[in-house]
């Protein structure tokens, strides 16, 4: 029975191989029998040795990884439009790999007994399947996308599977920017700045004859050798070194070293006598290797598409797990990863600004709150943010607010696209209560500080860890000063904040055993966030606020600053600083291993040594809580 | 025996078959429950005055919707309200094959069985269906009903800052969960959007303590 849903399914599958090879009757025949399967993040679709399903799968929304269960290696990553789980059905054997939903996903289950006869009848489909089984890639076309190399500006070939570099094909930029030999040097430089690229290909009759890089400008133009009105021919490096496509990374590196150059030109047949397909630069090689934060920052800044940032963030995760494996100090890791996250957010704000009809009416600042504000966010979590804009005359306020709310909606949606979940408590700048003018914020902050009920204290504790993600720093400083002034007038606020910092449940029980969760989904696991990290974070906040230190929002940096300010407590503060880092590293490792937020820890999975390490950090928690109780005389108000 | 309400006599066989399904004890395991997600398009908002134009529904078993098993029917109209036509584009005796109200109800009861009914702002759809049943001399639906508008609010954290809105439209839900709004304002299209939203809500609520069907009904 043809219906709206089957039409919807058909509309989707007809775009992807091998279905794009089928006639519409066959597509509808298939679509009517499809199962639409919802899979929550991390759930398993099939496991190794599981008997065949009656369906194979096409990813409609989300992403699925195919894993080698024994080594937990990700062997393939299926995005929207990719098929998986087909080969075992043809080979008539059990599944050899485990398929797991990498994100919340919707899959189309395509019935094999209907697909098989269709595939057999259609020669092209059979060829596609044979090739894909033989080459062991999902889509043999991916290697050879003839004809679309120039128009298809969005994708540089992304090879996501982690393979040895000497087998991995180097991806090259197909966004070829060229000029003719008669172009002036100035014109060429203009083009390059506009496209933010470091090299331009010089062609004559569509054949590559030379290449100009930033270096050529420096050495041959600025040095005065050539005027900027001269033609590019006078400064280009010629002849170009050309190669065929399907160059591996190692081959590309060798070729560059051999000729001492940083750019290779990929041509149709590998010689300078055929048209150019793209340029492979040292930069591309580095991105393929994926281990250089500077390259990633550059790649993020260059992109004008939010979806692309999502791709790059996958590399950030590869980078993170590499760092943890190499045991690089966590302070350093956090700095690099936060820097990358900040760059992503900045770029999302930039892209969103470009999509607005008008430039912002006044200056504004985009604030990161919570863990992100503290630069302690290593894994993807929720987004917590706020927006503050310069004060405007009262009659302009509604108009201005509307503008920034609109902008915030774009930004939060963009952040969601690149992997930050929406905040379930709606603490986001797209909420009219978190998108205010400077004066409105000041009023709100004064209210919180002057009326410290449990809610106000909670709000303050989330808000006071803000840092600037984008925009005008002076707005932020202005707010910080206001906070210190107000706290000075209402010292009782600190007592309430201190009291809040003592409310976290204790990590260990009477016999110094771990306290685990009693019920719910995380029964019998240890809540690392609320029992160990939060007490440290809360304590650092109240102490630093009592010293009126601004612009330090990171917890271990706060403790380091405190150690400097109070030499008599130096030892304890340094222990807290260390404990915070150790716990965060713990959480990040757990999160990467289990592909979640790392908040809950299965104690059974820990080694004796790890448990000891964890318990050592609890000593610091206990001592800092005692210090706070004494210093702020918390017991008085609890009575 | 005034305690028991008198059941009208001469109920048709399809009703008796439907009612009998509820005599067996239902499965308590949440994973094994069958859900029917439905939406109705109507001539207006009055239970008495207005009529159902179409009913669309999809069935969810183990987080899976089978395209073959969707429900999509259009009803013959004696009454016609010009004002709502532009919303769903269903014209009286338009291109679609229409069936009588009685036959539509019979088919619907056969489809829904004892499944749990899910709808967005379910009160309205249930009201329309129950009034239609009454018009045909039949009792009310016996199914358990869940409203996505209500259970969505359970996914939100309550704080004094964010009083959840009293009302979330299907459009807002689709935006929140990035569900394509294609085929919006057709009964089946809306039912599908509601179904995906329902699955996403459930996966977020599963993490909560004491998650069960009872929890959803509270």
Image (spheres, coloured by chain):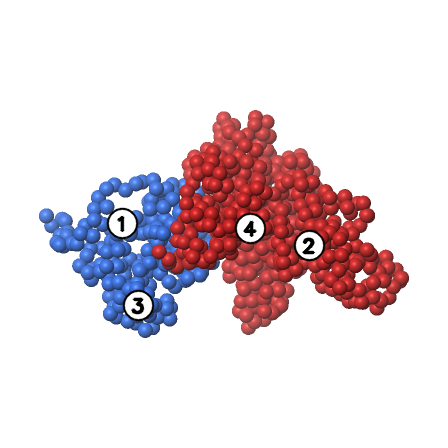
Chain colours: A red, B blue
Residue B52: give x, y in percent of width and height: 29, 64
Image quarter of residue B126: bottom left
| Residues marked 3 and 1 touching at CB (< 8 Å) | no
Q: Nearer the viewer, residue A209 or A361?
A: A209
| Percent x, y of residue B122 | 33, 57
Is A301 displayed left or right of B5 in the figure?
right
- Between disc 3 and disc 1, whose residue precedes? 3
Describe residue A531's horizontal placement relative to residue A263 as left or right: left
Query: Circle 2 sits on which residue?
Result: A173
Instruction: Please name the residue shown 64% across and 36% down the image.
Output: A325
Please name whichever residue, A47 or A301, is drawn nearer the observer in this view of the structure: A47
Please name which of the two marks, 1 or 2, marks the residue nearer to the observer: 2
Q: Element under label 1?
A: loop
Badge 4 element: loop
**Quarter of the rendering containing residue A194:** bottom right
Q: Secondary structure at mark 3?
A: loop
Residue highlighted by disc 4: A419
Q: Residue at x 49, y 53 (%)?
A: A19
- Same chain assignment for discs 1 and 4: no
Mark pair 1, 2: CA separation? 57 Å
Q: Nearer the viewer, mark 2 or mark 4?
A: 2
Q: Which residue is mark 1?
A: B113
Above or below, comparing residue A138 to residue A177 in the picture: above
Residue A497 visible in the snapshot: no
Q: From the viewer's perspective, tell me whether residue B18 is left or right of residue B38.
A: left
Could you tell whether A229 is left or right of A423 in the image?
right
Q: Which mark is residue B43?
A: 3
């Amino acid at each position: 029975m043809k219906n709206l849903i089957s039409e919807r399914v058909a509309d989707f599958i007809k775009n992807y191989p091998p279905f794009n090879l089928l006639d519409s009757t066959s597509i509808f025949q298939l679509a009517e029998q499809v199962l639409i399967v919802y899979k929550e993040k991390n759930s398993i679709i099939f496991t190794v040795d599981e008997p065949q399903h009656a369906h194979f799968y096409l990813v409609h929304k989300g992403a699925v990884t195919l894993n080698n269960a024994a080594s937990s290696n990700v062997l393939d990553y299926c995005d929207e439009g990719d098929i998986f789980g087909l080969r075992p059905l043809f080979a008539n054997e059990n599944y050899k790999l485990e398929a797991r939903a990498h994100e919340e996903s919707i899959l189309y289950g395509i019935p094999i007994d209907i697909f098989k006869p269709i595939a057999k009848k259609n020669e092209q489909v059979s060829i596609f399947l044979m090739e894909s089984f033989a080459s062991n890639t999902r889509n043999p076309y991916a290697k050879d996308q003839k004809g679309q190399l120039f128009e298809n500006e969005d994708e540089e070939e992304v090879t996501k599977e982690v393979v040895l570099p000497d087998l991995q094909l180097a991806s090259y930029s197909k966004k070829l920017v060229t000029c003719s030999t008669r172009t002036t040097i100035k014109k060429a430089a203009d083009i390059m700045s506009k496209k933010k690229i470091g090299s331009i290909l010089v062609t004559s009759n569509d054949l590559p004859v030379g290449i100009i890089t930033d270096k050529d400008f420096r050495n041959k133009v600025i040095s005065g050798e050539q005027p900027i009105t001269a033609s590019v021919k006078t400064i280009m490096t010629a002849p170009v070194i050309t190669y065929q496509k399907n160059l591996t990374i190692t081959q590309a590196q060798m070729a560059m070293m051999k000729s001492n150059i940083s750019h290779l030109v990929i041509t149709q047949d590998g010689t300078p006598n055929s048209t150019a397909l793209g340029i492979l630069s040292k930069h591309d090689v580095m991105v393929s290797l994926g281990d250089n934060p500077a390259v990633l920052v550059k790649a993020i800044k260059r992109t004008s598409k939010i979806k692309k940032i999502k791709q790059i963030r996958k590399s950030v995760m590869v980078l993170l797990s590499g760092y943890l494996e190499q045991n690089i100090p966590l302070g350093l890791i956090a700095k690099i990863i936060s820097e990358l996250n900040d760059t992503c957010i900045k770029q999302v704000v930039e892209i969103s600004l470009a999509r607005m009809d008008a430039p912002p009416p006044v200056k504004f600042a985009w604030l990161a709150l919570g863990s992100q504000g503290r630069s302690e966010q290593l894994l993807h979590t929720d987004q917590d943010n706020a927006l503050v804009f310069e004060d405007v005359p009262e009659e302009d306020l509604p108009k201005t607010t509307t503008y920034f709310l609109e902008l915030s909606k774009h930004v939060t949606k963009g952040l969601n696209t690149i992997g930050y979940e929406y905040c379930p408590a709606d603490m986001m700048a797209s909420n009219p209560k978190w998108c205010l003018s400077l004066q409105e914020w000041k009023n709100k902050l004064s209210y919180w500080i002057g009326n410290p009920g449990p809610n106000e204290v909670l709000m303050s504790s989330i808000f006071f860890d803000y840092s600037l993600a984008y925009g005008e720093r002076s707005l932020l400083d202005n707010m910080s000063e206001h906070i210190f002034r107000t706290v000075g007038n209402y010292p009782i606020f600190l007592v309430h904040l201190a009291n809040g910092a003592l409310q976290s449940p204790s990590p260990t029980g009477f016999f110094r055993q771990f306290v685990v969760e009693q019920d719910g989904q995380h029964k019998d696991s240890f809540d690392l966030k609320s029992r160990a990290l939060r007490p440290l974070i809360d304590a650092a906040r109240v102490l630093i606020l009592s010293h009126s230190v601004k612009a330090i929002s990171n917890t271990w940096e706060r403790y380091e600053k405190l150690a400097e300010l109070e030499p008599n407590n130096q030892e304890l503060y340094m222990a807290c600083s260390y404990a915070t880092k150790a716990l965060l590293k713990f959480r990040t490792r757990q999160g990467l291993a289990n592909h979640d937020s790392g908040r809950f820890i299965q104690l059974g999975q820990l080694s004796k040594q790890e448990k000891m390490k964890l318990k050592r950090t609890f000593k610091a928690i206990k001592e800092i809580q005692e210090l706070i109780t004494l210093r702020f005389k918390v017991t008085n108000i609890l009575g | 025996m005034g305690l028991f309400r008198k059941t009208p006599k001469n109920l048709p066989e399809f009703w008796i078959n439907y009612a009998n399904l509820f005599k067996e004890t239902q499965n308590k395991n949440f994973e094994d429950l069958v859900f029917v997600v439905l939406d109705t398009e109507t001539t207006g908002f009055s239970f008495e005055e207005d009529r159902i134009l179409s009913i669309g529904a999809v069935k969810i078993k183990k987080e899976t919707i089978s395209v073959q098993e969707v429900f999509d029917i259009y009803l013959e109209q004696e009454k016609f309200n010009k004002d709502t036509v532009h919303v769903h584009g269903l014209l009286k005796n338009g291109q679609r094959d229409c069936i009588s109200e009685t036959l539509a109800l019979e088919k619907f009861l056969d489809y829904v069985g004892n499944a749990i009914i899910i709808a967005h702002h379910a009160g309205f759809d249930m009201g329309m269906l129950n009034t239609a049943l009454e018009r045909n001399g039949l009792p009310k639906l016996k199914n358990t009903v869940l409203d996505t508008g209500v259970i969505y609010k359970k996914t939100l954290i309550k704080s004094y800052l964010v009083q959840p809105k009293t009302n979330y439209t299907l459009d807002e839900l689709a935006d929140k969960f990035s569900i394509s709004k294609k085929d919006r304002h057709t009964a089946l299209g809306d039912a599908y959007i509601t179904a995906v939203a329902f699955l996403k809500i459930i996966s977020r609520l599963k993490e909560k303590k004491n998650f069960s069907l009872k929890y959803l009904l509270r």
